[in-house]
Structures are given as structure tokens and as C-alpha cells.
Image: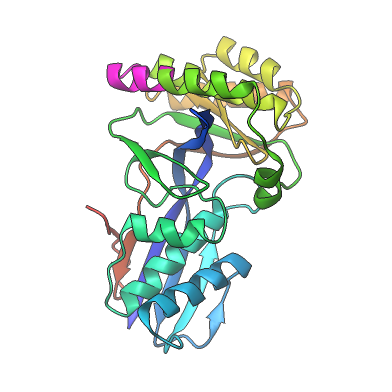
Amino acid sequence: MELTVRVPGSCGELLQGMKAGNPFLVTCPVGSYTTVRISDTLAGIHGLGRKSLMALEKTLTSLGKEELPWGLCLESSLPRGKGMASSSADIAATVAAVALAFGYRTYPEEIMRMAAGIEPTDGVFYPQVVCINHMNGDWLASYQGLPAFRISIFDTGGVIDTLSYHEQVKEDGAANRSAEALALFEKGWRAQDETLIAEAASMSACNNQSLLYKDGLEELLAFAKERGALGINIAHSGTVIGVLWPERFPDDDLQRETRAIRCRFPHLSFLMQTRLQGGGVQVAEGKQQEFVELFR
């Protein structure tokens, strides 16, 4: 037995809010991953936190198994408590890997039901970019063909407890603006207009200031747009901010303008350069580490 599963994290969300009294978020998957390896050459369970241990137990129970007869190791390049979907990626990778090890192929809806029973969940394990109700796990929409924005990720500092945040958040005046942002986003998606999409993400980020304030956010948005960025997105229940650059923004320009932002906003910590990509679950069997998409 030799099986490896990986699931991407996120740069927060492209949008998050309320529409018609129901919560929603639009995912923002990026190229950093949680990886779970199951092997008969491993002994014991390593790297699982409280939430991924719950996912392991739930998966074993759903399969009618009492224990995992192989070793398991979870590793992640995603920082914790920042809003980069680290827990969601951990849970999804654990569920998919354990099920596959026993010969069962899970589907996104199954992973979502299990994950939503543990915490409000990001849908990074769905293919493409999706809109979900992160509180109850309902899938709402899928958006294929979004531009692969270049994203500079910055951290405002500190750690946010996602569960505590969602317990405290109530629907307020930002709800109507959230619905407007989602409508603008879908208009931009249908028109394949990256400017409108980034504008919608920026609107959602600014709307969230009344719920979880990020110091200097509006100033960062204005400065970044002066430097050629299209907008920003945030972790609505976390600490990270993404600066959204055009898909074809040149490398040299990206490096120069990101340095300018770092100099102008020294209270922000630069985390990484990445791109918007599709979500999903990737699997590699044997020792070749050639990952393929589980949900094709």
C-alpha cells in the first residue's frame, strides 16, 4: 500500500457574505497543499490535528472500519489560523486518502458533508472555483474558466479561530452589499472580464471591514491599483490579504510592484506569490508521485 493525496489551500475567499438570508463563499484555491500519505512502510499516525483526527474517525466509522491498518502521515505548507483553508485541506485530504486506501472513491459532496459536521468549511476540494454555503455544506454554483490571477499574499498578523468567528458573526447591513458583490462577480465571470471579477472581490473585502477589521485595507487597495493591480481579496474569517494582478502580469513587474507594497505597508508580512487555480483532490499511487485529479 502506497497512496498520497493532496488538497490545495486558499488565499481566503474571492467573496463571502449573505444572500437572501443564507451564507455563501466563493473559493480562492492556490498552489499550496496539505498532503496525506498512507503506506505500509509507515507506522502510526503522524501530523494530524484535532480536526483531521475527527475526520479520520468519521471516515473509519462511515466505512465500518475500526482502525487504519497502515501508517499515515499528514504534512502541510499552509500556515494555521490565517484563513488559508488549512483545516479544510487537512480534513478533505484525510477523508479522501483513508477512503481510497480501503478502495472507496469519495465524492466532493461526501467530503463536504463530513467536513461541515466538524467546522464551517472551505470548498477547496471541489473542482474549479465554487460557491458554497460553508455553514451547512450546500453546493451552490461552479465557475469554470476564471482568469488565473497572479496573487501576492500578505498577512496582517495574529491568528483567528474560525469557529469562534462564525459563532459571533450576525447578518448586518453588509448582507445587501454581499449580494451585490456576488452579482457583479457572476457578471464578470460570464463576460470573462477579470477587472469586474477583481472589483467584486475588492467590494467583498471592504464589506467585511465591519465584521473583521484589517488595518489599512482601503489604503492598500488604492495603492495596489496605482501599481497595476486589479483589486484585492481577503480571508473574511482570517488574517491574509491577496493582491490580485492580471493573469498575464509580467514577472519583473510583479516582483517590483510587490516590493513597493512591502515598503509602503511594513506592518504586512509577505507570505508568497501564487496564482488562482482550480480546487480538487489529487492522488498519486505507488512511489512515482504523479498526481492525477480524483474528480475528473
Residue placed at 42% from the left, 68% from the top? 95
Answer left or right for 63 relative to 202.
left
Could you say which quadrant of the image residue 30 lies in? Answer: top left
Q: Can I make out residue 27 in this image?
A: yes
Residue placed at 50% from the left, 77% from the top? 57
Answer left or right for 97 relative to 83.
left
Q: Is residue 71 above or below residue 198?
A: below
Could you say which quadrant of the image residue 144 lies in? Answer: top left
Residue 237 picture location, percent across and down: 64, 40
Residue placed at 33% from the left, 23% from the top? 189
Answer left or right for 9 relative to 265.
left
The magenta-colored residue range is 184-193
Residue 94 picture location, percent across and down: 45, 68
Residue 248 picture location, percent across and down: 37, 23
Answer left or right for 229 relative to 102.
right
Q: Say if the magenta span includes residue 190.
A: yes
Residue placed at 55% from the left, 61% from the top? 118
Q: Quadrant of the N terminus?
A: bottom left
Residue 235 picture location, percent across and down: 60, 37
